Amino acid sequence: MKLYEFQGKALFRKYGIPVPEGYVVRSPDEIKEVKGDVVLKAQVLVGGRGKAGGIKFASDVEEARKKAEELLNMEIKGTKVQYVLVEEKLDIAGELYLSIILDRSARRPLIMASGEGGVEIESVPDEKIFKMHVDPVAGAHPFMGRVLSRKLGLDGQKAKEFTSMLLALYRLFSEYDAELVEINPLVITGDGHLVAADSKVIVDTDSLYRHPDLERNWEDATPLERKAMERGYAFVELDGDVGVIANGAGLTMATLDALLLHGIKPRNFLDLGGTDNVEVTKNAFQLLLEADPKVIFVNIFGGVTKCSTVAQGIIAARDAFSIEKPIVVRLSGVHEEEGRAMLREAGIEAFGEMMPAIEAVAKALREVK
Ligand code: GDP
Ligand code: MN
């Protein structure tokens, strides 16, 4: 999950990383007074905001309100601006780059620093980016800050500030289960101090249960997808006819592919996950019904999740939600025969193989259309 700049900066502040003074507004009249020059920054979760005109400057209240209004009426790469960050304008003498990412191929965090800040890092030549892996057990150490400072040409007080910033950023990175923390630009002010002028933080979505303090930013998601996420399901709305419930991301994707190969459009992606619980299946149906599919297809490979448990969940859902739409089920794996027998007894079509099941879905769809 991506954090907004102002949310990332709140975390920076919490970890002692210097950030400009500022606050967020949702409407221009929330700007009460302006001392000195300010910068107004549209808060969006997409990159390249500066270039898209999402950053403006002002030197009095009236101008600040006018610019904030302009920003709040803007759309940047398809997303409407809902917040504007109002900050003291920094006196910029230099712009650096500093980030920590999770380097999956090295299986450890990677620190990246560059003297070429304020531009997209993708456009900086590789030899101008200084990289250092961190052993996740040992953590970050002050020598890393000193080594990188020297490469960046920082000495004295600036090197000290850079080092404590790096250590704080690493602590934030690991304590918040981040996939990326980025300061671009890391500004050197006119009076020689280091300040994080921008923030980009991406937190591993699967770790969110450990971070109840983080507000959820789900604006890319539809209301139903949001509801599904809150209930712990991986769910994506699509625009077809057949509601899909499967288990495991791989099998769920394969199910969508198989349907599409037969010219059938799925209504959604719904991965049950890996628990052996009747309620999980039943509640998945409740979500799916809100998407109003014409036919429901359940495709399960039983393992930890037993086919018999899923069968119980399907029957419980049909009875609890009085489902009259056709339900086609394919059960394979642990307790498959038991599961299929339970379904057939309850009058629900059940298969062991994928293809006959898909054909049954096609037939059911022709009949309801
Ligand atoms: P981004 O384009 O969305 O990454 O937005 P940034 O917050 O990184 O700002 C882009 C650029 O705007 C920076 O590299 C600066 O050149 C400029 N900028 C942002 N804040 C300030 C500020 O407080 N003072 C000055 N002088 N320039 C700023
Ligand atoms: Mn930036």
Image (cartoon, rainbow, N blue to C red):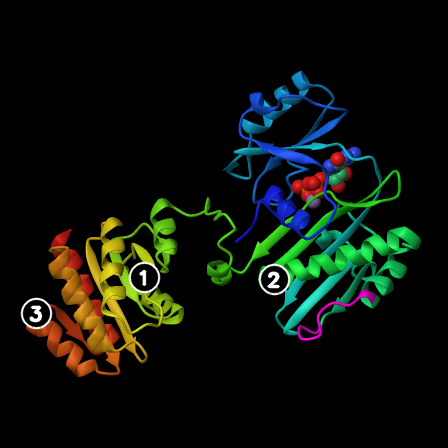
Which residue is rendered at x = 90% and y = 54% of the image? 154
Which residue is rendered at x = 36% and y = 57% of the image? 235
Q: Quadrant of residue 340?
A: bottom left
Disc 1 from disc 3: Cα separation? 29 Å
Mark 2, Cα crowd under 10 Å, few <14 / some 14-19 / many 20+, is few
How would you classify the magenta stretch by its main secondary structure? loop
| Residue type at tag 3 | Ala
Could one spot residue 156 in this view of the protein? yes
Query: Can you give x and y, in whole percent of width and height, for residue 62 in the image?
Result: 66, 16
Q: Report which residue position mark 1 lands on.
A: 260
Q: Quick one: 19 or 359, which is closer to the camera?
A: 19
Disc 1 from disc 2: Cα separation? 42 Å
**SS at mark 3?**
loop
Q: Report which residue position mark 2 lands on.
A: 175
| Residue type at tag 1 | Leu
| Residue type at tag 2 | Glu
**SS at mark 2?**
helix
Query: Can you give x and y, in whole percent of width and height, for residue 205 in the image?
Result: 49, 59
Instruction: Tell whether 103 sits left or right of 3.
Output: right
Mark 1, Cα crowd under 10 Å, few <14 / some 14-19 / many 20+, is few
CB contact under 8 Å: marks 3 and 2: no
Q: Report which residue position mark 3 lands on.
A: 346
Mark 3, Cα crowd under 10 Å, few <14 / some 14-19 / many 20+, is few
Q: Earlier in the sequence, mark 1 or mark 2?
A: 2
Instruction: Look at the image and give the residue range highlighted in magenta.
Output: 135-142
